[in-house]
Image (cartoon, grey):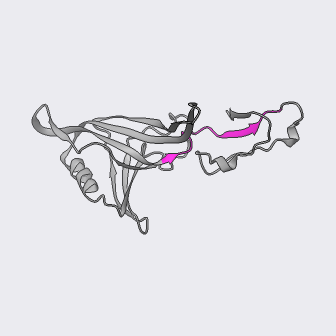
Amino acid sequence: MDDFSNLVEGGVLPPRLVLHSGADNKTLMTVDIPDKGYIPISERFEPVIDRYVTLNGEVRVRHKGYRYRCEIKLRYLNKETLRQIKCLYNRLTEDTRLIIQPHRDRPDISYQVDIEEPFLFEYIKGRMVGYYGTLKLTGVKVLTAIPTDYKVFHFCSISGEYSDYEITYFTSTTEENYNEGEISHFCPSDLEKHSLL
């Protein structure tokens, strides 16, 4: 699928879990969460903040970024997919990396994650007809911004002595997640963010 203009941001299909080797980044295993019994993934980006008090009692806050977290709730899981997930979990070591693609129709959106909760799957209504459970995963890296499909540019507001040609615009054509180094500042003006829609 090449045209994502009619999809919700980030895709619509269930997640894909990919296990990579740490040394050569080789794909060791891939597990596609099945459509049957899948409840749409729950994602959140928790602020990572350093908060401290200065000698004069002032509270200072340093916003470091966001940590990705997700829950994959499965109300039905067959024996084969459960076996694959168990195998993937069992192969996790300090020399491997677990990557989640929240929607497998958007493989360009992915996060390195770690397991947050114990592995727990139970029989549906106590009967051996299938399993249900939740996978809780936590992002390993701190993101500098919440990723978005909307291309964003940063510029300094025109206040007083600045004209249009003095303002530098920066956009990223390859990354959705902006690096602070891509932003140009002219002082003493205010930094503004605008969405290109």
- Where is residue 9 drawn, in percent x and y? 52, 36
Instruction: Check residue 145 for magenta coloring.
Output: yes
Give whichever of 99, 103 is nearer the camera: 99
- Where is residue 190 drawn, in percent x and y? 75, 33
Which residue appears farthest toward the front when viewing the image?
A: 55
- Where is residue 195 drawn, in percent x and y? 67, 33
Instruction: Check residue 147 for magenta coloring.
Output: yes
- Where is residue 105 drawn, in percent x and y? 45, 45
Over which residues does the magenta segment extend?
Answer: 142-158
Rendered-image quadrant of the C terminus: top right
Give whichever of 72, 138 is nearer the camera: 138
Does residue 75 appear to the left or right of 173 in the view shown? Answer: left
Can residue 57 be seen from the camera position used here?
yes
Does residue 1 appear to the left or right of 139 in the view shown? Answer: right
Can residue 4 be seen from the camera position used here?
no
Numbered-mark total: 0
Q: Is residue 186 above or below residue 23?
A: above
Give whichever of 126, 7 is nearer the camera: 126
Which residue appears farthest toward the bottom when viewing the image?
A: 24
Does residue 31 appear to the left or right of 185 in the view shown? Answer: left
Residue found at x 74% / y 45%: 184
Residue found at x 28% / y 42%: 117
Q: Quadrant of residue 157?
A: top right
Residue found at x 55% / y 38%: 63
Q: Quadrant of residue 94?
A: bottom left
Does residue 40 appear to the left or right of 76 in the view shown? Answer: right
Which residue appears farthest toward the left when viewing the image?
A: 127
